């Protein structure tokens, strides 16, 4: 066991503060990673504040981890010291159930080992995330990060990137498709970049006129203000695919009406209350309402390789870890374009 510096929430009401965490000695299949950057995901805030009611304290958040491999176990084949590596939302799963065998480890029937606020598969050892200087992960759950990717900008790919890449692939986004993206935040900005890179004609659907310039810079071809009835009506029957990244309450039926016949709307955000869907919103036009949760390890690797080939990273604001509590407040106000990334070097000072 090695004791290393980290930042943790001691309890739901507590701000994050310096903490010491223990990491296991790397086993035969493990990779020891010196963390360089860790993204700040909105779900870090929900969990650090116990807003989902499942929090384990003390909690070291962080599941958008990029670093360099410093040591590998005897049987590790994918990595050697010095390699760039990434860790996303999961660090292990049972590897044997139906979803695991289908490369959908995030839905492991035994419950995947999530990177923090969870346990290893022994169901005893707590997991601690990337707001720390090092992490030890089985190579099977460690991603290879192509050297061409800017490491700070690449960190959010491990959650925001795969969360938006996976539904675009699941629903076969292709050149010429008309894709609507609802909400321009951490997820939405990646959805715009990725869909545009796949050749889709992207429309940003936002409540905020101030987002138009950014949406176009990120690759959107069109912008519609969702507070304006007239502009929404013009979008009827338009989209092959809508990626809905919004967690605030909003009416799904309004957006379902924008799908062309057979179109699909995919939910990524989690509004606090259930939202009623009219049956006819789906029946009329064979429309589909779907959901998507991150992506499996294989698809996450595919996404990283795709982003390297297409020169895509997240737009980030790099911060020292000492300002993470202020960063949380700014995320809640949507005052970030579009992801905070912690420079872990600040933790060693
Ligand atoms: Zn996340
Ligand atoms: Zn499983």
Image: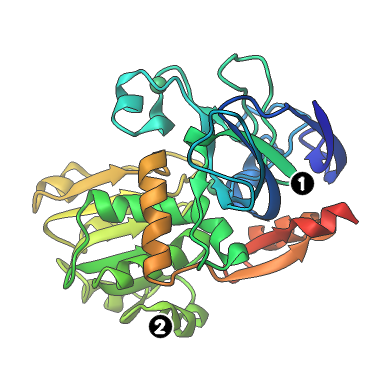
* Residue 226 appears in the rendering: no
Structure colour scheme: rainbow
Residue depth check, mark 1 versus mark 2: number of the one nearer the observer? 1
Disc 2: which residue: 216
Is residue 287 visible in the rendered structure shown here?
yes
Residue 111: percent from the left, percent from the top?
A: 47, 22
Q: Quadrant of the N terminus?
A: top right
> CB atoms at circles 1 and 2 under 8 Å apart?
no
- Count of residue discs: 2
Left or right: 260 as drawn, with respect to 41: left
Name the residue: 40% across, 83% down. Answer: 216
Residue that numbered label 1 is attached to: 133
Mark 1 and mark 2 lie on one chain; the one further toward the N terminus is: 1
Q: Residue at x 31, y 51 (%)?
A: 167
**Of 228 and 304, the residue lying toward us:** 304
Label 2 crowd (10 A; few <14 / some 14-19 / many >=20): some
In the rendered view, tell whether residue 290 sits above or below residue 121: below
SS state under label 1 = loop
Q: Position of residue 211 (x, y in %)?
A: 49, 78
Image quadrant in which you'd find residue 51: top right
User: Residue at the location (48% across, 81% down)?
Assistant: 214
Secondary structure, mark 2, is helix
Residue under the image location 47 percent in, 85 percent down: 213
For marks 1 and 2, give the CA distance: 37 Å
Q: Quadrant of residue 237?
A: bottom left
Q: Nearer the viewer, residue 190 or 326?
A: 190
Identity of the residue furthest to the front in this view: 74
Specify whether 105 is left or right of 139: left
> Where, quadrant-wise, is the C terminus in this rendering?
bottom right
| Mark 1 burial class by Cα count in 10 Å: few <14, some 14-19, many 20+ | many
Q: Indicate whether 301 appears above or below 105.
A: below
Please tell me in which quarter of the rendered image ligand 2 is found.
Answer: top left
């Amino acid at each position: 066991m090695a004791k290393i510096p980290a930042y943790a929430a001691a309890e739901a009401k507590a701000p994050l503060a310096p903490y010491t965490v223990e990491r296991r000695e790397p086993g035969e299949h493990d990779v020891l990673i010196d963390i360089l950057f860790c993204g700040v995901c909105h779900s870090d805030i929900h969990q650090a504040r116990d807003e989902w009611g499942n929090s384990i304290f003390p909690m070291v958040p962080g599941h958008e981890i990029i670093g360099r491999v410093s040591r590998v176990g005897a049987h590790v084949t994918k990595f050697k010291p010095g390699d760039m590596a990434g860790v996303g939302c999961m660090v292990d799963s049972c590897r044997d159930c139906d979803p695991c065998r289908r490369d959908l480890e995030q839905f492991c029937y035994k419950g995947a080992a999530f990177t923090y606020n969870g346990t290893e598969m022994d169901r005893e050892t707590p997991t601690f995330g990337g707001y720390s200087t090092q992490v030890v992960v089985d190579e099977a759950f460690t991603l290879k990060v192509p050297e061409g990717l800017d490491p700070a900008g690449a960190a959010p790919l491990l959650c925001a990137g795969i969360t938006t890449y996976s539904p675009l692939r699941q629903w076969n986004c292709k050149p010429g498709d008309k894709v609507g993206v609802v909400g321009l935040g951490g997820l939405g900005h990646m959805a715009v970049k990725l869909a545009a890179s796949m050749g889709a004609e992207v429309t940003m659907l936002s409540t905020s006129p101030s987002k138009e310039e950014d949406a176009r810079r990120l690759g959107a071809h069109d912008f519609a203000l969702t507070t304006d009835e007239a502009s929404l009506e013009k979008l009827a029957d338009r989209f092959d695919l809508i990626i809905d990244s919004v967690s605030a309450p909003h009416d799904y039926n309004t957006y379902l009406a924008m799908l062309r016949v057979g179109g699909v709307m995919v939910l990524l955000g989690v509004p606090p209350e259930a939202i009623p869907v009219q049956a006819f919103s789906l029946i009329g036009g064979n429309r589909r309402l779907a959901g998507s949760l991150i992506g499996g390890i294989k698809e996450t690797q595919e996404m990283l390789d795709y982003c390297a080939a297409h020169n895509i990273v997240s737009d980030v604001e790099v911060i020292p870890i000492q300002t993470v509590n202020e960063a949380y407040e700014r995320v809640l106000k949507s005052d970030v374009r579009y992801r905070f990334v912690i420079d872990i070097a600040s933790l060693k000072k």
